Amino acid sequence: MSSSSRLTIKDIARLSGVGKSTVSRVLNNEGKVSQQTRERVEAVIREQGFIPSKSAQAMRGQSDKIIGIIVSRLDSPSENQSVRAILPLLYEQGYDSILMESLLRPELVAEHLRVLRQRNVDGIILFGFTGLRREVLSEWQEKMVVMVREYPGLSSVCYDDAGAVNLLMARLSQQGSGQIGYIGVAQNDETTGRLRYQAYLDACQRLAIAPQAALGDLSYQSGFSLAEQVITPETQAVICASDTIALGAMKYLQQQALSGVKIGSIGHTPLLSFLFPATLSVDLGYANAGAAAARQLVGLLNGEANIRQLTIPCKLD
Amino acid sequence: MSSSSRLTIKDIARLSGVGKSTVSRVLNNEGKVSQQTRERVEAVIREQGFIPSKSAQAMRGQSDKIIGIIVSRLDSPSENQSVRAILPLLYEQGYDSILMESLLRPELVAEHLRVLRQRNVDGIILFGFTGLRREVLSEWQEKMVVMVREYPGLSSVCYDDAGAVNLLMARLSQQGSGQIGYIGVAQNDETTGRLRYQAYLDACQRLAIAPQAALGDLSYQSGFSLAEQVITPETQAVICASDTIALGAMKYLQQQALSGVKIGSIGHTPLLSFLFPATLSVDLGYANAGAAAARQLVGLLNGEANIRQLTIPCKLD
DNA sequence: CTGTTAGCGCATTCAA
DNA sequence: TTGAATGCGCTAACAG
């Protein structure tokens, strides 16, 4: 009842008639405690609702059991899926997570990293983006996993951007589409932009298809307006660099009553397949990537894993 | 260069030839330090890249400057918007946030609360849901703000569910719709379910409209299939309890080529107005709610505010 | 097996 | 204005 939760290990010791260290041992499940004493102490702990202070433990043991996660935007559907996979895995290992948004601004990342260092966090999972310089990250070397981008000397988890495009191109052309267009994003975005576009061009080469592409940004609007540019009477299919873009393109198709054009997209959003079931959608494996990152980080922190770059396989259907 | 960041206030003291307490004073911007000493110490701090340990500060001062945020799902668009408003406001006040998912499971909330207590967090923002019992929360009384639900004795921030429906009904009927249907969610959901449905019924009464409603869940699918039940040849408009439901209903309308039926919805998702610009959409004020909650919590923690229940006004357009 | 002792890094008295 | 001393709650040596 004594609400304040201000009890300390010392109180518990007094209340159960033992020394502080014995209580500590019970708390940490260390072996050297007699069954009797252990039970008595545990009883007191339970009935007092005692909870040891993390800050004190942290100060003593070095580890705060906290992980910092820096996403670009909390409402990015892809990062969201990854984070949802990360959280429970870390939690399971006793880590809580501090979440921060970078808004794609390098200065904000730097500031967040400062704060996280001050908090003495055990590790960091950072969603990378174009423009983020390596120097800022390097001091975290063995305590950081970067998502979506690779940096020399840092662990990372990336998607198979080219593979996704290839999968789409292969399936589409195998289904008889001879003229396949592409709606993407500007190439200053390294992965979603350049990599996917390049893969499209390469595939066109391989399949002897004349490329028909336009690059914009990640918005529906962009998808909508670029669709108009890309789609000609001959177009049989269009690949979109993201589901959001695809949503925009689909609106255009629908508005123009162009029912013959197939859409292939990357992202696998439930909404897209609900609204337009015919869409071909590649799952980049966001959740898997999150899980992989969490595991990799925990491995690093436990000294069981080495720094390495992972690529998550994508899949169609 | 001595990477480890293992420097302590003591090292800085030695390096700048002063006592530890003086360094502490400089760190906390306490007045009683001569300009000279202050500058010297600050120089050393800067060139050593010294960062004081949060855990130690926390243990000393009681406050960890950490807020726990428990959302139901990270990918809930509405909660997402709120959280995005909360984070920077708390951050601005020196608080970092630990984020957790309840998945609408009361036991998980209880567990999270335990962990947060152990971390000695300063406060909590909790997104409530039906089934969450007050007893679990009451011990946080003056350190918690509950979103979406009201609990006696706890601060809360709620939406104006009834107001939103009224706004929609008024506008729709004023635009000439005489027969307005409703697609909602089951009433065991107190707010999105019962409150909105009840408001619909009341408005029907007032406007002398014969209610035509169906209740399901929050999915597109539900919206789609219930649309079929609700919409009759006479239907001139349909109100949906959420944007997700509206998306489902719109798909039905489109598929049936029912272009005469207007849709009113609650949520104000950008996607909805992009895909179906004609939709009437009420903004419940998710971001405002988040901001209000953050402010309220900070106020509580500073002892500047009292426990109270807030309702965020909604708006159309 | 268990109690005692000694700090972890810092903020805060209290003297000087 | 400053430094020395004290203790926050806890774990890890070290004795018994």
Image (cartoon, coloured by chain):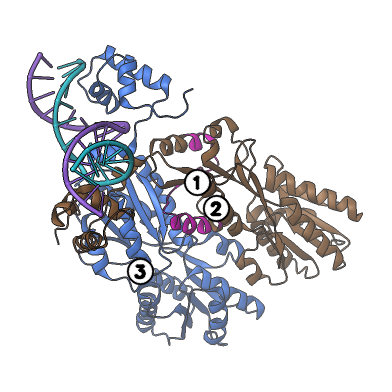
Chain colours: A brown, B blue, C purple, D cyan
Left or right of residue B29, residue A117 in this image: right
Q: Are marks 1 and 2 on the same chain?
A: yes
Q: Is residue B39 above or below residue B268?
A: above
Quarter residue A131 falls in: top right
Residue assigned mark 3: B107
Mark 2 or 3: in front is 2
Q: Secondary structure at mark 3?
A: helix
- What residue span does the magenta drawing correspond to? A82-110
| Mark 3 Cα shell of 10 Å, populated few (<14), some (14-19), many (≥20) | few
Question: Tag 1: Cα neighbours inside 10 Å, few (<14), some, or many (≥20)?
Answer: few
Q: Give the percent coordinates (x, y) of residue A44.
A: 19, 61
Disc 2: CA contacts within 10 A as few (<14), some (14-19) or many (>=20): some
Task: Reply above or below: A168 against A52.
Answer: below
Marks 2/3 in contact by CB < 8 Å: the verdict is: no
Quick check: can you spot residue A85?
yes
Residue beneath the point at 44% across and 43% down: A122
Residue B30, label in figure = none
- Residue A239 appears in which quarter of the rendering? bottom right
Residue B133 image-quadrant placement: bottom left
A10 horizontally vs A280: left or right = left
Q: Amino acid at mark 3?
A: Glu
Amino acid type of disc 2?
Arg
Q: Chain of mark 2?
A: A
Q: Nearer the viewer, mark 1 or mark 3?
A: 1
Query: What secondary structure is found at the residue carrying circle 1?
Result: loop
Name the amino acid type tagged 1.
Asn
Which of the labelled discs sits on residue A302, or is there none?
Answer: 1
Q: Quadrant of the C terminus of chain A?
A: bottom right
